[in-house]
Image (cartoon, helix red, strand yellow):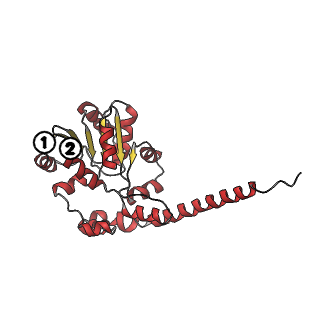
Amino acid sequence: MAIRQIRQREQKTGYFYVVTPNVDHIVQLEKSSDALLAEAYSGAGMVICDSRILSFLAKRVGLELEAVPGSDITRELLRTGRKGWHLAMIGGHPVLHEKLRKLYPNYEWTFHEPPMGILRNATARLAIAEFIENTKADMVFFAIGAPQSEVICREISMRGRASGVALCIGASLEFLTGAKRRAPGWMQRIGLEWLYRLSSEPSRLWRRYLLEGPKIFGIWWRWKTITQKKINASRHLGASGSRPSDGK
């Protein structure tokens, strides 16, 4: 379904961006005092759940939230793309770029490697926006992490000069080229991909998965409690409104 919707949107004019929130993204949204981050998610053309943990928590309150990992979406799009497809990538490094050209030679690739700290660098963000506007790629892969990817996608959308579909895909292209190893299928299926990534890059990811990630359960519980109160209040009002008149 997600792949089909992205392909349908690619055939239209204008600019459209896709975000793939996971646990880390939701935690960032909850603690952030920066309205730009929330606006980036609310302004997305498509929101696809990238986390089986989020999907599980949603089911606990009766919501159906299908998990479609961004890495799977990226792999399928590249596997089935048409010859001559013009693709752009924001992020990565020359070795990764060359591997992508070799793995997918039927596509036309264009790359832009921004500096670190782009959220605090208006010049760098402008350079990304102008690159996308001038390149006019059919699809743009943002591989500079969250919330950078989402915030910049929103800024580009607000400028109104770009075209194509942009996807915030994290480390997906690094998995496809072998620059990073993805968790085995069985770990993915039971929601333990985070544990594999933590063991692969402990110095970089320990804070995300051991300190920040567990906050999702508190966020979920607060949301569940607030939602239940609203439901109960609605039922109470409905019951009150259905009482027969006393004639006064």
Q: Position of residue 197 (x, y in %)?
A: 27, 65
Q: Quadrant of residue 184?
A: bottom left
Decide which of tag 1 and tag 2 comes sooner along the chain.
2
Mark 2 — residue?
Answer: 81
Residue 146, image x, y percentages: 35, 51
At 35% from the left and 45% from the top, the residue drawn is 18
Residue 100 shows in this picture: yes
State the image coordinates of residue 165 (x, y, percent, origin top left).
31, 40
Measured in 3D between alpha carbons, the distance from the residue under mark 1 to the one under mark 2, in whole angstroms, is 9 Å
Amino acid type for the residue under numbered disc 1: Asn
Tell me if 218 is positioned left or right of 200 in this view: right
Circle 2: residue type: Gly
Quadrant for residue 133, please give it. top left
Q: Residue at x 36, y 58 (%)?
A: 67
- Residue pointed to by mark 1: 106
Find out whether the residues at labels 1 and 2 contact each other: C-beta distance under 8 Å.
yes
Q: Is residue 27 left or right of residue 84?
A: right
* Mark number, residue 20: none
Q: Which residue sits at x=42%, y=44%?
A: 40
